[in-house]
Image (tube, coloured by chain):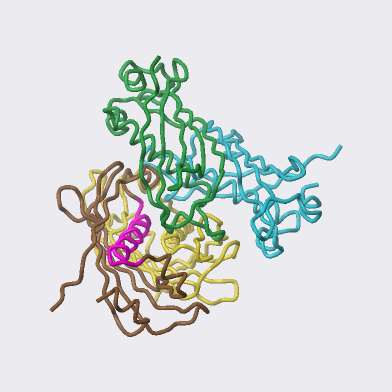
Chain colours: A brown, B yellow, C cyan, D green
Amino acid sequence: MTIPPVSDSAIRVRYAETDTMGVVYYANYLVWFEVGRTEWLRDRGWTYREMETNGVKLPVIGAQCEYLRPATYDEALVIRTTGIIHSAVRVEFRYEVVKEDGTIAARGSTMHAAVNDRGRPCRLPPQVREVFQ
Amino acid sequence: MTIPPVSDSAIRVRYAETDTMGVVYYANYLVWFEVGRTEWLRDRGWTYREMETNGVKLPVIGAQCEYLRPATYDEALVIRTTGIIHSAVRVEFRYEVVKEDGTIAARGSTMHAAVNDRGRPCRLPPQVREVFQ
Amino acid sequence: MTIPPVSDSAIRVRYAETDTMGVVYYANYLVWFEVGRTEWLRDRGWTYREMETNGVKLPVIGAQCEYLRPATYDEALVIRTTGIIHSAVRVEFRYEVVKEDGTIAARGSTMHAAVNDRGRPCRLPPQVREVFQ
Amino acid sequence: MTIPPVSDSAIRVRYAETDTMGVVYYANYLVWFEVGRTEWLRDRGWTYREMETNGVKLPVIGAQCEYLRPATYDEALVIRTTGIIHSAVRVEFRYEVVKEDGTIAARGSTMHAAVNDRGRPCRLPPQVREVFQ
């Protein structure tokens, strides 16, 4: 059995990402998820940019996030990401946002559909499958 | 049987909200959801601001969104929002982002827990229940 | 002498736009400036979108802003915008962000260079000059 | 003569930071400037967070940016920052956003006024002066 590979992306909370409550605004976790999956793909030898110039896109068709503990300005966080093949036409990424003390700030996932260069849904091409296995 | 009240918030897609794919970046729908629930609360006679000065907060503990059709720069959209009591300690908001032709760009929801002025979870106070019923 | 026309864009401060200090994060004024100039152009009969499909772009080459009074969550603001021809190749927009009591929250400007569809600097085409006069 | 110290902050362009033109949206440079000055202060032994708990704030009262070359998704950039004392009550930060080939994407500055814990303008306290010298 293969264990899906995990990538860790270190980020630091920016002032712009906080809100009046003094904590990270909830939409920003989705921005960090993108940072996480970009790095996961890069670690596996491929970048979004290359994928897009090759005519394959993986637009988000669904996202969800649970907020467990607030994060505050200047905090060092790790986005822990893994990617899996969900079906013949979809891949899924899962994320944990980990605080310095090891507790989880948030946990979420995004679902992505393969789309060809004319913007039509398509089966995951072999070069995408390879990255995710 | 009462039908939960709905509020419509008109927005126009800002350039800042689009990305390299030429469509609205997925995290921004959560920002719009906040615009929707702020307006829903205002329509029901209460504002976040008042609620917060009264010592009651409703931080987001979960969010999810399905992306159905892309939205592009300068497009006029409506955020259709409704709020319901989910349990003794939680309220839920549901959202649809409607395009000018009546089709749905995205659909989502957020879950909120009542928190008192010391940041501790608490039962929904009567003045919050009243707004949601 | 002609007075340059002014457009007023009403906005309401979003929670996402505030920061830990409890006020609007400074970069967001530039986002609002874009809302202002989009509306100014629309009021003058032309949209960014059309301009871009016509092969003329007006990318920002400089921006500046003075912050005079903080703005807070849920505040209703007006972005007061005017546009002028700065030279044969540049236009300038000027902005004031006005609070409900009539005081100014911020004041700024952006400089834009005309660029053709191959991304090269060019003289302001007649249809752009017309809009700005 | 002392040379003002410089700090370099490495960032990578996020998808959320790009726009329909396929380049970084102009307001995001101000977000990066904040990343730069946070790191500059940290390198000099002090953090915003500590400064704020000590009752001294340095809110932005002015910002400006010149955009020289576009930056695109996934590009690795360096924010080169320096801070100087501007007057008895103000400090200034200057920034260059440097591309991998050494060319400058943008250049800007922010002006900050010292404010005490009651939100009133004040002279730069000794512990701030020390950091900037």
Query: Is C62 part of what is drawn in magenta?
Result: no
Q: Can you say whether D130 is above or below D9 in the image?
A: above
Label total for image: 0
Magenta-highlighted stretch: main secondary structure? helix
In the rendered view, does B84 fall on the left or right side of C91?
Answer: left
For the residue pair D114 and A51, the one nearer the viewer reads as A51
Which quadrant of the rendered structure holds the C terminus of chain A? bottom left
Q: Residue at x 33, y 36 (%)?
A: D39
State which quadrant residue A79 falls in: bottom left
Q: Position of residue C127 (x, y in %)?
A: 79, 56
In the rendered view, does B20 fall on the left or right side of C45?
Answer: left
**Magenta-tinted stretch:** A25-46
For the residue pair A30 and A85, the one nearer the viewer reads as A85
Q: Residue at x 49, y 72 (%)?
A: B105
State which quadrant residue C47 falls in: bottom right
Query: Is A41 part of what is drawn in magenta?
Result: yes
Q: Position of residue B72 (x, y in %)?
A: 56, 66
Q: Position of residue B77 (x, y in %)?
A: 55, 66
